[in-house]
Image (spheres, rainbow, N blue to C red):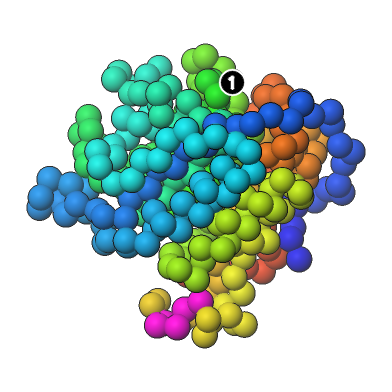
Amino acid sequence: MAERRACLWATNVLLLLLALAPPTAARAMEAKVFAIGDFVPSASGGCGGNDIGHWPDMVDEWYDEMDSEGHSKDGQYTNGNMTIQRFCDVDTLAGCNDSAFLDDADTAMIALHGSDSGDHWAGTMRAPWSGQCALDAGGTADNMFVGDLDLEFIHLSSCFSADDDNLGGIRNAMTDPVDGGHAHQWDGFHGIMWIGGRFDDDYEDFADDAHDVAMATAWVTNHYRNNSVDCEDYDPFNWFGTCQDQCPVAYSISSSESSALTRLNHERYNNVYSDPPGHGWYAYMYMEGCNSVGETTFNP
């Protein structure tokens, strides 16, 4: 069962579904993809990380389906000079250029290694820039802030990108601290997520379904894997020595309890609301009892 919760700072309140707020007119969106499958060893001047060549192909399924749904392919960045410069905000770090890359999209998907860095997610870059190899986002992180330009929906095909203990701080990455402005939704994973050809359809189906049902519902239902049932199919090599779940999490923000939860329950690619007026409240959706590798059972 998918659970929906709304929170004021650290307080969790279980709520019923709320009435649909008026959306803006349906429009074509600009989509971008940022993916690393070929990481560069630290000894060669890179940021490290094991290569997973299929990762860019997997998220390309989302990108192609967005095109099929009438949206525009606005940039596909794979490997190359992937540094934090493409994701960080110039208001907080001189030389950053998210305005030409991440925040220039209406919707974007990021695929790269991730870790839980205290109170936030950290994504491994391919090369260092300004002395940094990690794209830090949320909590006390100080380089990624989106929403003051175009970005509305950000999807992270990355481990630990929506851990239960970091939920309160994700809204910081969705809010520009200087210019104001807010992104609408952040979708990620609690703990380890999976990569491989078996998951290609999940990304295509997510893009397709998110035009017919709430984007949050599409993310959680397409990416959830109950490995007590699916282990033979989805972890045939027993990579981590255990059959545990893949735990997707969808997350929205707004200035009120009702607005945050209504956005979570109703916003779609073809049903886009106006920008959130604030981020005092956040709402999230997950699969109850989901128990991922690298984390305890989801329990914010």
Q: Between residue 20 and residue 11, name the one nearer to us.
A: 20
In this view, the residue farthest toward the left is 43
Q: Position of residue 193 (x, y in %)?
A: 48, 63
Count how many numbered circles sit on residues in the image. Answer: 1
Specify the amino acid type for callout 1: Gly
Q: Residue at x 55, y 67 (%)?
A: 246
Q: Position of residue 195 (x, y in %)?
A: 43, 65
Q: Residue at x 64, y 61 (%)?
A: 222
Asked if 277 appears above or below 210 in the picture, the reply is above
Q: Between residue 250 and residue 10, name the one nearer to us.
A: 250
Q: Between residue 299 and residue 107, name the one nearer to us.
A: 107
Q: Residue at x 29, y 20 (%)?
A: 95
Q: Residue at x 10, y 50 (%)?
A: 44
- With 45 as the anchor, is 31 left or right in this view? right
| The C terminus sits in image quarter | bottom right
Report which quarter residue 127 is drawn in.
top left
Q: Is residue 50 magenta?
A: no
| The N terminus sits in image quarter | bottom right
- With 109 as the anchor, is 263 left or right in this view? right
Q: Position of residue 128 (x, y in %)?
A: 21, 38
**Image: magenta residue range:** 234-238
- With 271 as the anchor, is 169 left or right in this view? left
Asked if 171 appears above or below 157 in the picture, the reply is above
Asked if 196 appears above or below 137 in the picture, the reply is below
Q: Which residue is mark 1?
A: 181
